Amino acid sequence: HRSTIDDVLSLCKRRGFAYPSGEIYGGTGAWDYGPLGVALKEAIQRQWWRAMVQLREDVVGLDSSVVLPAAVWRASGHVDAYTAPVLECERCHDVAAVPELRQAAGEEGLRLDAIPCRACGAMGSWVEASPVTRLVSTRLGAGAAGGEAHYLRPELAQGAFLNFANVVTTSRRRLPFGIAQAGKAFRNELSPGAFPFRTHEFERLELAYFVEPGAAAGWHDYWVEQRREWYVRLGVDPARLRRTERPADDLAHFATRGTTLEYHYGDPEAEWGELERIADRSDDDLARHSHASGADLRYYDQRTGERYIPHVVEPVAGLTRAFMAFLVDAYAEDEAPTTRGGVEQRVVLRLHPLLAPVKVAVLPLSRHADLSPLAADLADRLRRHWMVETDDAQAIGRRYRRQDEIGTPYCVTVDFHTIGDRSVTVRDRDTMRQERVGLDALEGYLAERLVG
Ligand code: ATP
């Protein structure tokens, strides 16, 4: 049997959650988000923002630049340290990423130097080479060498550090407090993998949480738990979530500690895959920027009268990995009753109603001239509150299957009784139970069921 990830990828393409990017040119290795995918992604991000910013007194939002001058990335340590190890073939000078070679060696049960060069086939030809930068660069301006070097951000946090003093002053925050950002990041990944685990361009949900020196350990545990609960509240099976400590030799250059939240994708290649990580960054980033820019980035503690550089605890989620985890978790195949009294197989996405891309489908029982305008009016009314789809093609059972497959929590059917009694049939995606609801009460009925 195919893995759930395969099933989900095929559903993604079939129904418009995600398409291989540049497919008409043979594909670029990246993925683009289709009409349903962009809605799901937006819903995940919105729930993250609600939990992290809207519902918290101690966190504020920020939207900082994607492109920053090289000086910033030199100061942050990324230019020197944000690199990937590679080996070079002595014979043909082909360069290969070490993790990729290790994986190939592991699969064959071989030592690294027993892996042949994939370009020329030479054996034992690997020698150490200088590491390759994982930063994506560009040039801006009209200088001699075609402008001044800039880098696209590999993480959003540096924007939070550069604005730390601005935020403290303008929002009058006291420690502990956080700066939240959501947005794209870019990395030169030497071994990009299958959607959406490792891509050159991806979206991050980041919180930089500033605390008193010495308070980081407690806050670290607090955030691991908060973030785990967030996934569970949005319907993820707790048995498919686990936390692991990052070994010290696998920490980024800025981190002093790292905990990983993993999801059990159930795919042989990604049994447990990283969803999110919580890192302690000490006072390193602010201290570096303070030193390089000459700006005093110390925090003035009114209680003690001291000035110091706060420490940072940083939970960071990969939005695109969460996207896949929610889909894999929601994917199910079961049986549904047919109108003729039999049963048929159905694919259903049991997405949390807050995440479902389409909240309500309005389905006229047939294309009869008395029903179509009624259904169109009702859909227009409901659209003011939620994403609504209408569908009048084919038998009602087929239309339920189409909505089940994209996770629509409620289908509302307009039939001939509706004309006389001003009521509709509401069908629940999960229980498949149907209820008659008056048109006047419908918005309230749905609102009650579509909130968190
Ligand atoms: P690496 O695996 O390259 O060491 P990392 O896990 O150290 O990367 P972080 O900055 O800690 O990178 O990543 C935080 C989160 O961002 C990860 O848990 C993951 O969900 C997501 N992420 C990181 N890199 C990518 C990528 N290339 N594509 C998609 N998501 C990514």
Image (cartoon, rainbow, N blue to C red):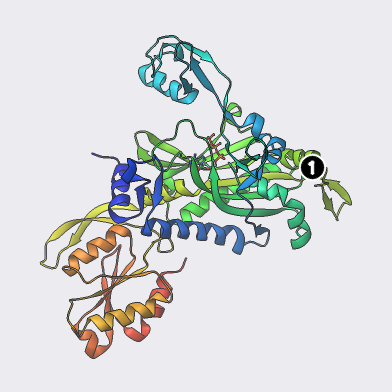
Residue 55 appears in the figure: no
Q: Nearer the viewer, residue 59 or 205?
A: 205
Q: Is residue 85 above or below residue 192?
A: above
Q: Quadrant of residue 246?
A: top right
Q: Nearer the viewer, residue 38 or 180?
A: 38
Q: Is residue 197 left or right of residue 348?
A: right
Q: How many marks?
A: 1
Q: Position of residue 106 (x, y in %)?
A: 41, 20
Residue 143 appears in the figure: yes
Furthest residue to the right? 305
Q: Position of residue 38 (x, y in %)?
A: 42, 57
Identify the residue shown where x is 84% and y is 52%. Answer: 300
Q: Is residue 203 above or below residue 339?
A: above
Q: Is residue 109 left or right of residue 397?
A: right
Furthest residue to the top? 124
Query: Dot 1: what SS?
Result: helix
Q: Position of residue 319 (x, y in %)?
A: 49, 49
Furthest residue to the bottom? 420
Identify the residue shown where x is 67% and y is 53%. Answer: 178
Residue indicated by mark 1 = 293
Q: What kind of residue is marked 1?
A: Ser
Q: Position of residue 4 (x, y in %)?
A: 31, 44
Identify the residue shown where x is 14% and y is 59%. Answer: 343
Q: Quadrant of residue 425?
A: bottom left
Q: Nearer the viewer, residue 104 or 341?
A: 104
Other residues around mark 1 within 10 Å, as few (<14) / some (14–19) / many (≥20): few
Q: Is residue 358 left or right of residue 335?
A: right
Image quarter where the N terminus lies is top left
Identify the residue shown where x is 50% and y is 34%. Answer: 189
